[in-house]
Amino acid sequence: MNFFDEASLRLKQQLKVTEDKQAAETLGMTGNAWTMRKRRGSFPEKELRALAQQRPELGIDVEYVLTGLHAPVQRPDAYEQPVHERLKIDLLRLGLSAGQAAQAVGVPESEMRNALLGVSAVPAAWLAALAPLKLDVVYVLLGKGQQQVSYALNPTEERLLRGWRACSADVQAVVMAAIAAGETQARQ
């Protein structure tokens, strides 16, 4: 499987769709434009990044789509923040306003704002209602995220990974041979 196909599968997973045409339309592309890009092996990264910015409610993890690795999330230690503060932090991570969160939960915005300020408790039912929007419920409750990543790739490593996935098996074999030679040389 090549990089385009792998990234497409991850994109469809993030969008919860099954067809290329659905993914293309969500990105603002025609099915024909998607097919042409697929033939060229040119994944629509620019369109993906624009979609993630324009529609934060989709909760698209762009780095996951492009690299297969979840982007690291910078969050304070669990013991530093109460539940309402961690909820506020995770809503910011998702790009959701208090109004959007209130709408998803089905409560007035003022009620959501009071909970986010710590004036009232955050009901568990709210977290359950926000979970489909990719709220990290484990983080909000316990301060330990489900998708915490202990490392992140630098831009060169990301490029290597994308290039590796786009290469044929023959090219990958040559790259592996070069790595093995480099490791042998480093040990000497």
Image (cartoon, rainbow, N blue to C red):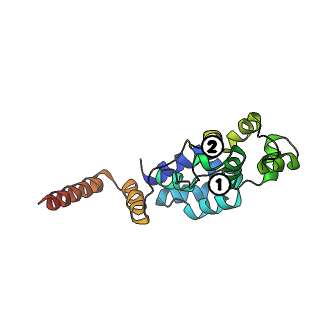
How many dots with numbers?
2
Callout 1: helix, strand or loop?
Answer: helix
SS class, disc 2: loop
Residues 49 and 96: in front is 96
| Closer to us: 120 or 73 | 120
Q: Disc 2 designates what residue?
A: 136
Question: Is residue 29 visible to the viewer in this orientation of the structure?
Answer: no
Q: Position of residue 70 (x, y in %)?
A: 51, 50
| Lower position in the chain sequence, tag 1 or tag 2 | 1
The residue that mark 1 highlights is 93
Residue at 53 percent across and 52 percent down: it is 65
User: Disc 1 and disc 2: Cα gap in Å?
Assistant: 10 Å
| Contact (Cβ within 8 Å) of mark 1 with mark 2 | yes
Give the residue displayed 68% in from the left and 39% down from the top.
Answer: 131
Q: Amino acid at mark 1?
A: Arg
**Horizontal side, residue 53 vs residue 159: left or right:** right
Q: Residue 35: give x, y in percent of width and height.
A: 55, 55
